Image (cartoon, helix red, strand yellow):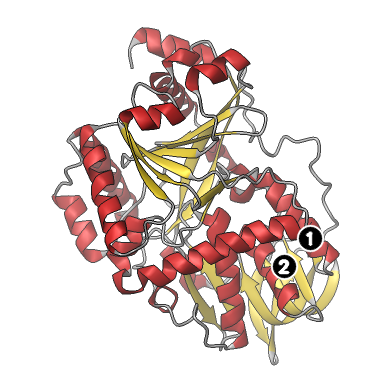
């Protein structure tokens, strides 16, 4: 980073508050009391992020008489569900390319289910009056290198060959810069309907209220400590009591699963984001962005960025940090060296916004798995179901995961449970220190590929062949 660019980037961060912008909202609901004593229910949902909230809501929609309890270790939405970029995507496979590589035969079905799932989220936003700034404006994948332009054309041609290109539009440099003006943009692929922008914390809080209105009993500051069989059902111990349930759905994602054998399938990766102060009318005019799409660049180490309801820009991604041992700790929620790097990249993308300042800077842990998209399963003779491994694309896909868990707990064969994606598992991560060394080598290799026209080295090619990787 050049000294002048570094100085300007540092100045832009001088007033940034080290807290997630979305969670610092005066409308944040108060916490509900923790569980004390013994509760009994038909379904216990563990986890108060999107995964758990959607599962509880869908369970009541399927059967309003079902007695549902949800427990959350802190407060609803405090972790990844309240810290993410607010990109709610239809894709269940972490993008078309990943889906095509892993499940080519069922990709059209996965795309259809993903579209229906996003439609279902949009319908729920309307039905339950979820005040979450939902805007189905789509997302543009932008190319910032010549080889990425070629790759976007190849992806579009493959999507078109499969008859899945409805709503997609290839943009040349002039067309993409007419949408959002950056001198770094060389082309783009606009998915007009497949992604919505929203306020992630407000979505979580709205789902909490909707669940309560349907009769779900929610207990916050109530972590699940262990899971055991109790007669024909299950028991989960909490700090001040326990829950006895006929069935249990685990939506704990990045946190260690209560089913211990599941833990090897995920590792926590830390992602970081900046939020600007609101843009003035002149600043908005300088970059355009009238259609308010989400954007992401096409590098391996990519940035994602979007404009908020009050005309701020969220700018995140690039660094993905794995800590030896895979622990989730509060001290990893902030990384000033990454904030500085992100700020410098921001002004390289939007030099016309020089002088704009960042109001917030934060990070959080994402649960990633080796296939970069969710996996599912059951334990304890089908009395427990789990879904995890969303790898940063859980805002929308967790609703689908909730449906899968409910199907599995009911023992039903459905179009979801018939999917190879649902029936198969990713490769587990190896133990330490192999995991740390392998992830580090993969990150280095991805960065090298970005510097060398996208060319993947022997390590990345080997990881591709065995289906084990690490998404930056």
Q: Give left or right: position of 375 versus 437.
A: right
Q: Give left or right: position of 261 versus 174.
A: right
Q: Where the N terminus falls, by quadrant?
A: top left
Tell me which residue sits at (28%, 45%) in the image: 152
Tell me which residue sits at (50%, 36%) in the image: 272
- Which residue bears the numbered disc 2? 57
Tell me which residue sits at (56%, 64%) in the image: 117
- Residue extending furthest bottom? 232
- Which residue bears the numbered disc 1? 210
- Front one among 287 and 469: 287
Q: Residue 431's x, y, as percent?
A: 35, 61
- As drawn, the label of residue 316 is none
If you read the primary sequence from the N terminus, does the residue marked by circle 1 or circle 2 appear first?
A: 2
Q: Where the C terminus falls, by quadrant?
A: top left
The answer to whether residue 203 is seen in the rendering is yes
- Residue extending furthest left? 458
**Label 1 CA crowd tier, 10 Å (few <14, some 14–19, many 20+):** many
């Amino acid at each position: 980073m050049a000294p002048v660019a570094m100085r300007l980037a540092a100045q832009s961060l001088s007033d940034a508050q080290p807290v997630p912008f979305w969670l610092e909202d005066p409308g944040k609901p108060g916490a509900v009391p923790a569980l004390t004593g013994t509760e009994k229910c038909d379904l216990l949902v563990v986890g108060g992020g999107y995964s758990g909230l959607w599962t509880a809501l869908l369970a009541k929609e399927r059967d309003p008489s079902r007695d549902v309890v949800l427990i959350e270790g802190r407060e609803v939405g405090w972790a990844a569900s309240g810290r993410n970029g607010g990109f709610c995507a239809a894709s269940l496979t972490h993008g078309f390319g990943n889906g095509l590589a892993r499940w080519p035969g069922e990709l059209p079905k996965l795309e259809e289910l993903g579209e229906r799932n996003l439609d279902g989220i949009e319908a729920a936003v309307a039905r339950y009056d979820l005040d979450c700034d939902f805007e189905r404006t789509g997302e543009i994948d932008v190319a910032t290198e010549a080889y990425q332009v070629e790759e976007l054309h190849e992806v579009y041609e493959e999507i078109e060959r499969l008859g899945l290109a409805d709503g997609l539009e290839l943009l040349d440099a002039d067309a993409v810069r007419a949408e959002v003006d950056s001198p770094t943009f060389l082309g783009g692929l606009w998915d007009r309907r497949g992604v919505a922008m929203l306020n992630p914390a407000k979505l979580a809080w709205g789902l909490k209220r909707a669940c309560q209105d349907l009769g779900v009993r929610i207990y916050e500051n109530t972590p699940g400590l262990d899971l055991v069989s109790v007669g024909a059902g299950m028991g989960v111990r909490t700090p001040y009591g326990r829950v006895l349930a006929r069935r249990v759905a685990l939506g704990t994602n990045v946190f260690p699963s209560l089913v211990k054998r599941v833990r090897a399938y995920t590792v926590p990766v830390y992602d970081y984001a900046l939020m600007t102060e609101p843009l003035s009318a002149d600043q908005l005019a300088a970059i355009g962005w009238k259609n308010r799409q989400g954007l992401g660049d096409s590098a391996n180490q990519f940035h994602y960025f979007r404009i908020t309801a009050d005309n701020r820009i969220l700018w995140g991604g690039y660094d993905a940090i794995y800590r030896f041992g895979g622990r989730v700790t509060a001290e990893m929620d902030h990384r000033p060296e990454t904030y500085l790097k992100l700020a410098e990249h921001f002004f390289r993308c939007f030099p016309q916004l020089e002088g704009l300042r960042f109001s917030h800077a934060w990070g959080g842990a994402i649960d990633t798995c080796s296939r970069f998209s969710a996996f599912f399963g059951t334990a304890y003779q089908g009395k427990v179901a789990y879904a995890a491994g969303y790898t940063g694309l859980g805002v929308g896909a967790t609703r689908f995961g909730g449906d899968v868990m409910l199907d599995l707990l009911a023992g039903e064969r459905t179009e979801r449970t018939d999917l190879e994606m649902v029936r198969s598992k990713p490769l587990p991560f190896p133990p330490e220190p192999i995991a740390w060394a392998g992830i580090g080598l993969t990150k280095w290799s991805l960065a090298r590929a970005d510097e060398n026209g996208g060319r993947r080295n022997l390590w990345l090619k080997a990881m591709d062949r065995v289906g084990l990787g690490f998404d930056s």
